[in-house]
Amino acid sequence: MHHISLPVLHTEIPSTQESNLGTNMKLIIAGANGLLGTEIVRQSLQIPEITQVVALVHQTVHLDESIDSSKVKNVVIDDYGQYPDDVKAEFAGASACTWTVALTPLQPGIDFAEVKRVCQDYTKLGFEAMCEAGPARPFRFIYLSAGGTPRDPTKDPVILPEFFIMRCNTELMVQRFPTEKEGLEVCIAQPGVIANYTTWSRALVANLWRIINRFGQSLPSIQRSELAAAVLSQVMDGFEKRTLANSDLVRLGRRELKFRSTPRSS
């Protein structure tokens, strides 16, 4: 799944919820066999406090054989909009979810109705299934959106207006989740172009660059490792803001990676 983005700034009130989930954390990674999801899985295995990883996928996540993946449970589903009881049971007691399931209208052979269903409808249905399963409290849900998504759905963006207005409405929907159920924290992550993608996606990004440059705007980017690290730091330690722009994610990701690489005194 790919995220396509334009720059945007948001200043919002930081979360006042309890900031640390402690040890024995169960993490749900939705879309775990995507390029970003796989990196989140890989990094989560390096964090001792994350003791269970539920990889919600269409196909089993395949990691390097040198990686100990014993704490990963692959939960394979056909449709991110349908959750049988046995799947919901895997969500019980989860402390957090990273939701990376998305499509873009630039992917060949995909009509907008399908893009909306994946980006918006599946997000709501997946979140509701996790809440019905009885997660831990607090339960942190971070939604991977697209940088440049406006917060006013009545204003047409310059690029891909239908897509970005839909993402705007999806973000507003996610932000309402805590008002509907107690003990929930939500965060919107708005990354720019995610680097380290495949040849196909690099071509996609190059084409988008040509479109953006016509309007004189730059396109922010973030390394896949930085974005995964930023997301994990936020579900572990608490959300710094309700919306994290690309610059926030780069800063948080680099800080987290530096922290992990620093030798600890015995």
Image (cartoon, helix red, strand yellow):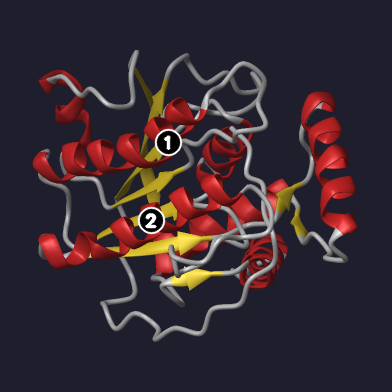
Q: Which picture quadrant has residue 137?
A: bottom left
| Disc number placed over residue 196 in the picture, else none | none
* Disc 1 and disc 2 in contact, CB within 8 angstroms: no
Label 2's element?
A: helix
**Gap in angstroms between the C-alphas marked 1 and 2:** 10 Å
Q: Nearer the viewer, residue 186 or 86?
A: 186
* Side of 177 where 98 appears, left or right: right
Q: Amino acid at mark 1?
A: Lys
* Side of 98 where 173 appears, left or right: left
Q: Amino acid at mark 2?
A: Asn
Residue under pointer 1? 116
Q: Examine the rendering and report whether any part of residue 132 can be seen.
A: yes
Q: Nearer the viewer, residue 234 or 171?
A: 171
Q: Which picture quadrant has residue 7?
A: bottom right
In which quadrant is the C terminus drawn?
bottom right
Whether 43 is drawn above or below 113: the answer is: below
Q: How dense is the environment of label 2, judged by Cα within 10 Å: few (below 14), some, or many (20 and up)?
A: some
Q: Examine the rendering and report whether any part of residue 72 can be seen.
A: no
Q: How dense is the environment of label 1, judged by Cα within 10 Å: few (below 14), some, or many (20 and up)?
A: many
Report the residue at 31% width, 64% height from top. 175
Q: Position of residue 36 (x, y in %)?
A: 61, 39
Report the residue at 34% width, 62% height from top. 172
Q: Position of residue 85 (x, y in %)?
A: 11, 22
In terms of sequence position, does the residue under pointer 1 or pointer 2 come before the other?
1
Residue under pointer 2? 169
Label 1's element?
A: helix
Report the residue at 76% width, 35% height from top. 197
Q: Position of residue 126 (x, y in %)?
A: 27, 37
Q: Nearer the viewer, residue 128 or 150?
A: 150
Report the residue at 15% width, 67% height from top. 179
